[in-house]
Image (cartoon, coloured by chain):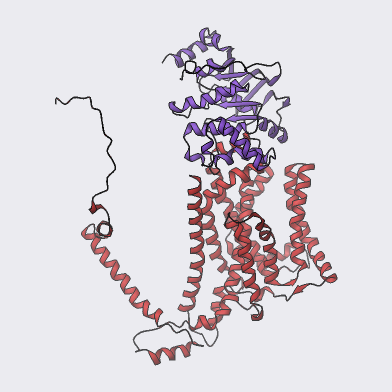
Chain colours: A red, B purple
Amino acid sequence: MSDTPITYVRDTMLPQQAPPTSEVGPVRWARENLFSSPMNAILTILSLYIVYTVISHVGPWLINGIWDADSLSECREIIAAKGDGHHSAACFGVITARWHQLVFGYYPSELYWRPVLALLVFFVGIAPVLFPSLPRKLFIVSMVAPFLCFWLLWGGSIWLPISIALGFGVGVVAFKLLSVSVSSLVAIIGAILLPLIYWLYLSGPLAAGLASIVPLGIEFVPSRSFGGFMLSIVIGLSAIVISLPLGILLALGRQSDLFIIKTCAVVFIEVIRGVPLIVWLFTAQLLLNYFLPPGSNFDLTLRVIIMVTLFASAYIAEVVRGGLAALPKGQYEGGDSLGLNYWQSMQLIILPQALKISIPGIVNTFIGLFKDTTLVVFIGLFDPLGIASAIRATTEWNGIYWELFLFIGIMFFISCFSMGRYSLYLEKKLQREHR
Amino acid sequence: MVELTQERAVDRSQMQVSDEVAIEIRNMNKWYGTFHVLRDINLTVQRGERIVICGPSGSGKSTLIRCINRLEEHQAGDIIVDGTELSSDLKNIDKIRSEVGMCFQHFNLFPHLTILENCTLAPIWVRNTPKKEAEEIAMHFLEKVKIPDQAHKYPGMLSGGQQQRVAIARSLCMKPRIMLFDEPTSALDPEMIKEVLDTMIELAEEGMTMLCVTHEMGFAQAVANRVIFMDQGQIVEQNEPTEFFNNPQSERTQLFLSQIIGH
C-alpha cells in the first residue's frame, strides 16, 4: 500500500511532440524492412543478386536492339558485324517494319485516318462520362459518337448507322408511351422488343431504301481487313462501353420484385457466365446466322462484339449487384420516403453509391475483357496475336518470337495498367469528395 | 431522458387541433410471414395533433408508422392519409410519400451528396421546383434547424445530432403536411438529443401534425396531446400525456413506465 493520494487533477494538457530521429528516415526504413534479421539480410542480398543477373542479361539485349532491319537475316548480319560475338541483341526491326500491320491489320493504308479519327471521336465522346466537370452539353457528342465511330470504321452508306440509331429512338418512344398508357412492366418489355424487331426486319431495308434515294457514303471496309491492336481496341472498347449500362440494367433486374424480369435477368446471367467465352465466340462465328432472318449477312466482327459484350455484361451485373447489396437498406428507404420513384432513386441515390463501391470490380472485369479479346484469334480474326503469327509465317521474319510477344505484352500492359490507375484515381477522388 | 420543460417554456398557442382528419387507420393488420406484428390497429389522427407512440421493443410501433407511408405493406384493413387510401398503386404511394415527411433512427442521409443537395434533391425531382428556388427553400429550412453554415459539407462530416437535424430539414423541404419520426434520438449521444428535440418542439409549436415513436418522455409531456402505448402489436392504452404518465390504467403500461422512469 502506498501513500499516494488517489485524487489527481491535470492542470496542463501536454502538447504534441516530434518523434525521436531514429524513428524516421530511409536508414530506419532499410533497417526495418531489408535487414531486420540475419535471415532477412541474406534474403535481401540474394534478391539483389537475382535482380542484377536478370538485368545484366536482358539489359544489353534490349539496349543493343536493332531497330532498322527489314528481315531477320539482315538483323542478324548487323548484330554480327557490330557486336563482339558474346552478346545477343533484340531484333526490334520487326516492329518498325511491320508497325502498320501490328496496329491496323490489313486495313487499307490510305484509309488509316479513319480508325485514328474514330478513336479521337471515341475519346471526345467518353470525356464527359469520365470527367464530370465538363459541360453537360457534351453528352450529345457521347450519344452520336458510337454511330460516327461505326461509320468511320466500316464505312459504307451513312444511312445504316442512322437507321440503327433510330432503333434506340423507337425504344425510348415505346417506353415513354407505354409507361404512361399501360404499365411500367409492359413499357420495359416493349422498349426491349420493339427496337429488336425494328433492327431485325426494318432497319436494313430502310437504310437500303434511303441509300438508293440519296447515296451518301464512304468506302466500305470489310471486317476481315480489321486487325492488330485496332481490332482489339474496337472489340474491347465497344464491349466496355455497352456492357456497363447493360450490366447495370441486369443487376437491377436481378433485384427486381417483378418475377418475369428477375427470372430473365437471372437466367441470362447464369447461362452467359456458365459457358466459356471461347464457346460463345464459336457460337458467334458458326451458329448466330441460323437465328437471324434469312438473307441478313451479319458481320463477323460485329457478332464477336455482341458476344463479348453480353459476356462482359453478365460479369458486370454481378459486380454491380455486390455494390447494390452493400448499401444499407436505409438508403432505399430514404429515397422512398421522399417520394422519389424507382428510377429516380436508382439514378440519384442508389447507383452513384453502388457504382462507387463497385469501381474496382468493374475495372477488373474490363481489364479481363480487354485481354480476352485476344481469344478471337481462334475464330480466325487477326488480333495482335494473329498478326504476330502471320508475321512469323513470312520468309523475312520466320523464326522471330521474343520481340513480337514482348511488344504485344507491353502494349496490353500499358492499356490495362492505365485502366487500373484511372480506377484508383476515381476511387480516391470520390473518397475525398464524400468523406 | 431530457427534462425539457424546465429549460424552455413550450409555446402551445399554435398547437391547435382541427377537426380535419389527417390519418385514418381502420382495422389494420400486418404479418411478417406468419408472425402477426400489427393486430387490429384503429387510429384517427386529426390535423395538428402531436402523437407520441411508445412501447417495448418489438411491440410494432416502428412498423405502424412505417405503414403510414408504405415503407411496410399492410395486409388487411385501410389506411387513409390525407384523403388518399394507401393501395398498391405506385402513383398513389409516391404522392402520399411526398406529402408525408419521415425521419429515421439512422438519419438515412445520402452520403454522396452535400447537405444542400440532400435537401434540394426531392423538391427538384419530385416537385419540379427550379434549382435556384429549391436551394432557397433548403437554406430557409437549414437556417430553421440552425445549421446553414454546414450546407456545403457532406453528411459524413457532421455530428449525429446535426445529421438528424439535416434529415428533418430535408423532409421539411417537401413542405409535408404530416411528419413521422421513427426513434429520431435513439442513435444519438445524450449531448445531441436535446438539439434534435428542440427542433422537433419548434415544429410542434408551428402546428405540424406529428407522429413520433420515441422514448423521450420529457418530449411527450411537453408537446404531445396524445400518448399511445403499444405492446405485442396492439394499442394497449392511449391518453393525454398528464393522465397517461400520472395515472396509467393498464398493468402493462404501469410496468413499462416504472421501468423507463424508475432509473
Closer-to-camera residue (A161/B184): B184
Residue B19 location, quadrant: top right
Q: Position of residue B75 (x, y in %)?
A: 66, 26
Q: In screen coordinates, is A236 left or right of A13?
A: right
Q: Position of residue A119 (x, y in %)?
A: 62, 68
Up-down: is A42 above or below A348? below
Q: In screen coordinates, is A17 left or right of A168?
A: left
Residue B60, can we see it?
A: no
Up-down: is B158 above or below B25? below
Q: Position of residue A95 (x, y in %)?
A: 51, 80
Residue A224, can we see it?
A: yes
Closer-to-camera residue (B33/B255): B255
Looking at the image, how many numbered discs can be counted on the residues? 0
Q: Position of residue B65 (x, y in %)?
A: 60, 25
Q: Residue at x 56, y 45 (%)?
A: A324
Quick one: quadrant of the N terminus of chain A?
top left
Q: Residue furthest right?
A: A213
